[in-house]
Image: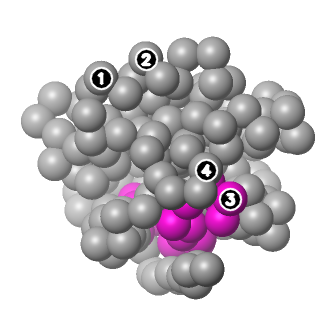
Amino acid sequence: MTSQKEYLTAGRTTSTESGLHKLVERVEAASRRPIRVVIADDEILNHDIYQAVLSGYGISHIQFAEDGQEALDAVDTHQPDIVFLDTNMPRMEGHEACKRLRQKYGADLRIVGMSSLSLNEKLWEGSGADHYVNKDVLCGTSKGDNLGNYLKRILPRDF
C-alpha cells in the first residue's frame, strides 16, 4: 500500500492572483478553517506540481492519494471541500471512487474528475462529478483556461 502525503505550505500570490487569493481568504474566514483539498493521482511526480500551483492560490491543506481507494479513505479522514480524481488509477478508477463518494456524501462535496486525455471526459458522464478538468488546467500549463478562473467557478458558494 502506498503512503499518503500531506503538504502544508504558506500561500504565495502575485498581483494577478490577488483577487482569487482574497476569495480563498474570504471562504476560509467564513468557514473558520482553511480550504481542504484531496487529490487522487497515481502519477506521483504530479503531486509536487499540484501542491506548488494550489499553494500559489492560497490553498495549503492538500492530501494526496495514489488510487481511488486511498481517495475514499482520505476524504473520510480529512473532510475536504474539493476532491480532484484522476480517471485512470490502480485498484479503483476515479469515476468509480466518484460514484462511491457521491453516494456517501451527496451534493455537499465538490468532486472534479480530471485526466490528461480529453477522451476520458466521457467516462465521467453519469459518475456524479460536479466538473471535469484537463490536468493541464490543474498543473498550470493550460493556454486557454487557468486554475484561478476554474477555482472561482467550483468553490462552494454556501461558505
In this rendering, which labeled residue sits more in front, label 4 or label 1? 4
Q: How is the image coloured?
A: one colour
Counting residues from the start of the chain, the first of labels 2 and 3 encountered is 3
Which x, y percent locates residue 86? 45, 47
Counting residues from the start of the chain, the first of labels 3 and 1 encountered is 3
Disc 3 marks which residue?
A: 69
Q: CA distance from mark 3 to mark 4?
A: 6 Å
Which x, y percent locates residue 149? 36, 35
Would residue 151 appear left or right of 135 to someone viewing this image?
right
Which x, y percent locates residue 154? 54, 33
Of the pair 15 and 115, the residue shown nearer to us: 115
Q: Describe the element under mark 2 as helix, strand or loop.
A: helix
Q: Residues within 10 Å of mark 4 (few under 14, many from 20)?
A: some
Q: Please say if the residues under marks 3 and 4 sit with CB atoms less than 8 Å apart.
A: yes
| Count of all numbered marks drawn on residues in the image | 4
Q: CA distance from mark 4 to mark 1?
A: 19 Å
Residue 155: in magenta span: no
Q: Describe the element under mark 4 as helix, strand or loop.
A: loop
* Amino acid type, callout 4: Met
Give the magenta range.
54-71
Counting residues from the start of the chain, the first of labels 4 and 1 encountered is 4
Disc 4 marks which residue?
A: 92
Instruction: Quadrant for the N terminus, please.
Output: bottom right
Question: Does 68 sit above or below residue 62?
Answer: above
Counting residues from the start of the chain, the first of labels 3 and 4 encountered is 3
Question: Does 55 sit above or below residue 67?
Answer: below
Residue lying at the far left of the rendered structure: 143
Counting residues from the start of the chain, the first of labels 2 and 4 encountered is 4
**What residue is rendered at 35% in x and 54% in y?**
18
Mark carried by residue 119? 1
Q: Describe the element under mark 1 as helix, strand or loop.
A: helix
Query: Is residue 6 among what the camera can see?
Result: no
